[in-house]
Structures are given as structure tokens and as C-alpha cells.
Image (cartoon, rainbow, N blue to C red):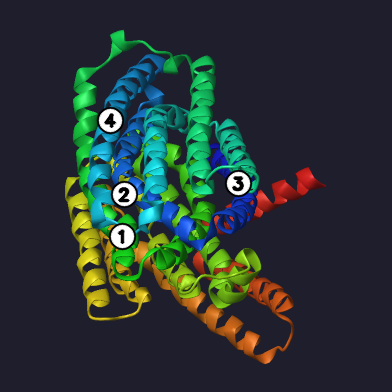
Amino acid sequence: MKNSSRIVVNTGILYGKMFLNMGIALFSTRLILKALGTNDFGIFAIVGGVIGALSFLNKAMSTATQRFLSYNQGKGPEQVARVFNTALLLHVFIGLAFVLILEIAGVFLFDGFLNIAEDRIPMAKFVFHCTVASTFFTVIAVPYDAIMNAKENMFIFSLFSVLESIFKLVIAVLLFYTPVDRLATYGLCMALMTVFCRTIKRIYSRRKYKESKLNFQIIDWSLMKEMLSYSSWITIEIVSHIAKGDGIPVILNLFFGTIVNASYGIATQVRHSISLFAEMLFKASNPQVMRNIGDGNIDKSVQISTTVCKFSYILMAILSLPLIIDCEYILRFWLGKVPEYSVIFCQLVLATQLVIMTARGLNFLIDGVGKIRNYRLILSVLNIIVFPIAYICLKVGMEPWAVFFGIVLSDILVVVVRVYFAHKYTGMNIWHFCRSSILRFVPLTLIVGVIVHRVQELIQVEPFLNLIICSIISTALLVCGFYIFVLDSNERKYTKELIQKVRKKLG
């Protein structure tokens, strides 16, 4: 119960951070789109997408660092310090390698590969170099993020994130007053902001946690080899993820240019903002899952992961349904002028995110056990199939949204694979998991969606009031249905106790 309470407290802190960041980000995006214009916004999206595609490889070591730090929390500060310093040295090497790879790739990207107007190529190259520089500082800051997460210090972690969002808002406002090219100004300011925030984070961590003080004399080379081996399989899957996620904007750019890239970039930001609700729960629960596995308590980790799957899905559904149903009005209210295809892109992105959330929590369970080779290889194959399907669909003349045919197929198969490997490596009962979660909340979501859509057809009110009414109805139906049909007796009991505690504190 103590661990569960800690997860709840940390999740609450992360949600507070997320609400602030989300509000600031939505307003900032509107300002940036207005300041840059659709074409320059699309250029930044495609350049950032290419950088993201390559620098996304860093996630492999980030996952490995988080896993080893959390796994070793119960083994004393000396072991944690050994893991941290080993990971830090490794990330310095990775950061330098990224700079080299990205700069070499940049030589070819702007030589006819990207569909960018010739007069904007110099500014696009400048933004590219700025983003490469910020990527290096992002990479070497990963161990500091990981130790704050492993220590479950979510308040400070959230504070740094909010500070970064405020800087982004300031940058968005400054774009309207800059005397020089706005795209170049935006790229430079974003790079400087990243360097500053990462530097402050490192200073804090080194003063707060003695395990994070630099001491290369305790580097464990055998541990570094183990981390590299562990991360190599994650790297293979992440490389394949380029084709599934960050590669899609490149394909769209080849067929339709930067206008469609702007639409896809907006949809991607919507997905990112909404998925943060679930990601905060993952971030709060992940250290507990890893630590219990490290202590040999796998059954407890399975229980936590299963519960996280349920709550992450319902949080995603509560936010996604109103957005899917009233997407056009919401985008018009948010952006003013909505780029073509933005509505359908956003709706499909949210739908695929719901599919992934059905078993997303099991990913950390499998990673915690450490037997990830076959799991990551199969996920890699499922990611790769998206790229050729998207290319073929567009090559035969289909609309831009056709790229989601492959994405939906891949996401469904990913869920199947996650459930299977969670069973194989931890003994999780597949039938119990499916019967208690997927086979309950997926039909519940569909039924609520049909009801809300029908209500929307029956009522005749102005769009904003219609959105409020439908949001209230969908939230009420989802929460009630989730509590009655999805939660088991222990989860309902704990939910009641948690509500009572909150009432007492508020009262």
C-alpha cells in the first residue's frame, strides 16, 4: 500500500506538471505557427523529424540507464554510483557519435532529398545545426534524468519541465519582435534553451545526489558491456521505429511537400500532449516495477503493470473521445486557420494511440526482466512493415491519411506480442489479462463513443457548448463503466480508500 501511495503521489505531481506544460504548449504552438507561417513551420517539422529520427537512437541508452539504476536501487548507494558514472561516460561517447552522424547525414539531406524551397534551404541548414548541438546536451543529460526518476523525485523533475515550457512560450512571443529571420531565430533560441535547462539539471543532480558525483575511477567496464548489450536490442527496435514514426513525415514530404508536413506535425503534437497523461503514470510506476523485479518480487511487478495498463488506457480514452468526435472545432479554436488534413491526421493518431495503450504498461515489465532480444526483434519487424505500406499507398495515388493503414496493423500486432512475452518471461496469465482489461475497456470505449456521437446528433447547440456536454457525458460513462466493469475488487477497494483520503485532506 505504501508503494501504491507513492505511485499515486508521484503521478499527481506529474499530472500537475503536465497540465501546466500542456496549456503553455498549446498556446505556444499557436503563436509559433502564426509567427513562422505554414511553410516555415513545416520546414521546422521536417528538419526536427529527421533529427528526431536519428537522435531517437538515444532512447535505447536512456531506457537501459533507467532500468539499471532502478534495478539496483536496493543494492546500496555505491552500486548506484557505479551504474550512474558508467552510464554517464557511455552517454558522452554516444553524444559525440550523434553529432558526427547527424552532421554527415545533413550533407545529403539538403542535397535534393528534402522537398524544401531553394530560398529557405540556408535557414533550414542553420536550424539543423542548432538542433544537432542541442541534441548533444540532451544526450549527456539522460543519466541525470534517470537518477531523478529512479529516486522518484518527481517534484523537481516536473519543475524543470515546467521551466522549459515557460522558456518555449517566451521564445514564441519573441519571434514577433525579432529583426532577423524568424525561422533562424527560433532554431537558435530553442538550442540555447536546451543547453541552459540541461546544464541547470546537471548542477542540481550533482548537488542533491552523491551517487551522481563524477568519479570515473569506479567505472564498471563489465557493466558497461552489459548495458551496451541490453541497449543494442532496444536500438534495433528504435531504428525500425524511424520507419514507423519519424519516417512517415519524410514520405509525406516526398509526395506532398511541407504543407502536409505541417498538418502531420500538428497531429503529432496533439498525440504527444494527450499521451503525456498516460506517460506520467508510466514514469511514476516504472521505478516500482523495476525495483520489485530486482528484489525478486515478479508477481508484484505483474500486478502493478496490469493495473497501470488499465488506468493508462482509461485516461487516454477520457481525453481522446471528445477530441476525436469534435476534432475540427477544437483545431479551429486552437489554431485559427487549420491546415488541410490536420483533422483526419489527429483523429487517426489518437485512435492508434488508444490501441497501443491497451498493453503499453507491459513494456516496462518485459524490459525489467531483461530478456528482450526476441521481443525487440519482433517489434522491429512490425515497425518496419509500416514504411513500405505507407509508400505503396501513396505511390498508387491514395490520400495522405492512407499511411495509417500500416500503422494500425502494426499497432494491433504489437499489443499481441507484448501480451505474449509478458506471459513468457513473467508467467502472467494471458487469459486473465485479456479478460480483465482489453476485452472489457475496448468494448466500453466503442459503446460510449457511439452514445456520445448519437447525443451530438440529437442536441442542437453552439459548438463550444456541444463540446462541453459531450465531454461530460463521455467522461461520466467511461469512469462509471471502468469502475464497474474493468477494475477488480482489490482495485475498487483501493480506489475507494484513495478517494476517502483525498476527501479528508480537502475537507
Which residue is at a point 22% across and 62% down the rendered structure image? Answer: 382
In this view, 344 is above or below 17: below
Asked which secondary structure carries label 4, the reply is helix
Q: CA distance from mark 2 to mark 1?
A: 10 Å
Which amino acid, mark 4? Ile
Q: Residues within 10 Å of mark 4 (few under 14, many from 20)?
A: some
Residue 333's disc number:
none
Q: Check whether the beta carbons of the residues at disc 2 and disc 1 lie within 8 A of each other.
A: yes
Q: Earlier in the sequence, mark 2 or mark 3?
A: 2
**Which residue in the protein does label 4 denote?**
94
Q: CA distance from mark 4 to mark 1?
A: 25 Å
**Which residue in the protein does label 1 denote?**
250
Q: Quadrant of residue 440?
A: bottom left
Residue 370 place in picture, x, y as percent: 25, 39
Q: Residues within 10 Å of mark 2 (few under 14, many from 20)?
A: some
**Foreground residue among 201 and 258:** 258
**Which residue in the protein does label 3 denote?**
175
Q: Residue furthest bottom?
A: 458
Which amino acid, mark 3? Leu
Give the foreground label among 1 and 3.
Answer: 3
Residue 53's disc number:
2
Residue 145 place in picture, x, y as percent: 45, 31
Task: Examine the rendering and report whether any part of residue 295 can be seen.
Answer: no
Give the foreground label among 2 and 3.
Answer: 3
Give the foreground label among 2 and 1.
Answer: 1
Q: Quadrant of residue 338?
A: bottom right
Which amino acid, mark 2? Ala
